[in-house]
Image (spheres, helix red, strand yellow):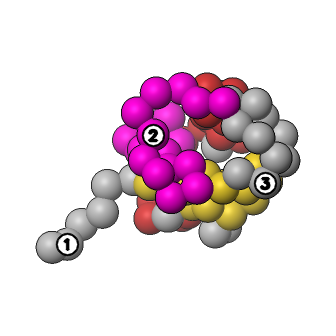
Amino acid sequence: MIKVLYFGIAQEIAGKTGEEFGVESTTGLRRQIYEKYPRMKTVVFRLALNGTMLTTDTSLKDNDIIALLPPFAGG
């Protein structure tokens, strides 16, 4: 199981700050998130794995932490 942390609009859509998923890759994670929260398809977001921003599909392992990061306003 991996833990997903939601921020900004993603947190509003999910209605929680985080939850766990049983997936093996970030592609599988996106698929499950979109199935569970269809509105999330309209949100542009990036993923960070254990504190490192991702740019490609990545394999996941138990106890990984993914942060789902939409754009943030402010300066």
Which mark is first along the chain, 1 or 2? Answer: 2
Q: Pinpoint residue 10: horizontal percent, then vertical percent.
A: 51, 56
Q: Say whether marks 2 and 3 touch (CB < 8 Å).
A: no
Q: Is residue 35 visible?
A: no
Residue at position x 45%, y 59% in the image: 9
Residue at position x 53%, y 42% in the image: 40
Viewer-closest of 1 and 50: 50
CA–CA distance between discs 2 and 3?
17 Å
Question: Which residue in the structure is indicated by mark 1?
Answer: 74
Q: Quadrant of the C terminus?
A: bottom left
Which mark is first along the chain, 3 or 1? Answer: 3
Residue 54 numbered tag: 2
CA–CA distance between discs 1 and 3?
32 Å
Q: Can residue 12 be seen in this view?
A: yes
Question: What SS does tag 2 mark?
Answer: loop
Left or right of 15, for residue 43: left
Left or right of 34, for residue 46: left
Viewer-closest of 8 and 21: 21
The residue carrying pointer 2 sits among few (fewer than 14), some (14 to 19) or many (20 or more) residues within 10 Å by Cα, namely some
Let me know if residue 46 is in the magenta part: yes
Question: Which residue in the structure is indicated by mark 3?
Answer: 63
* Dot 3 amino acid type: Asn
The residue carrying pointer 3 sits among few (fewer than 14), some (14 to 19) or many (20 or more) residues within 10 Å by Cα, namely few
Residue range corresponding to the magenta coloring: 40-59
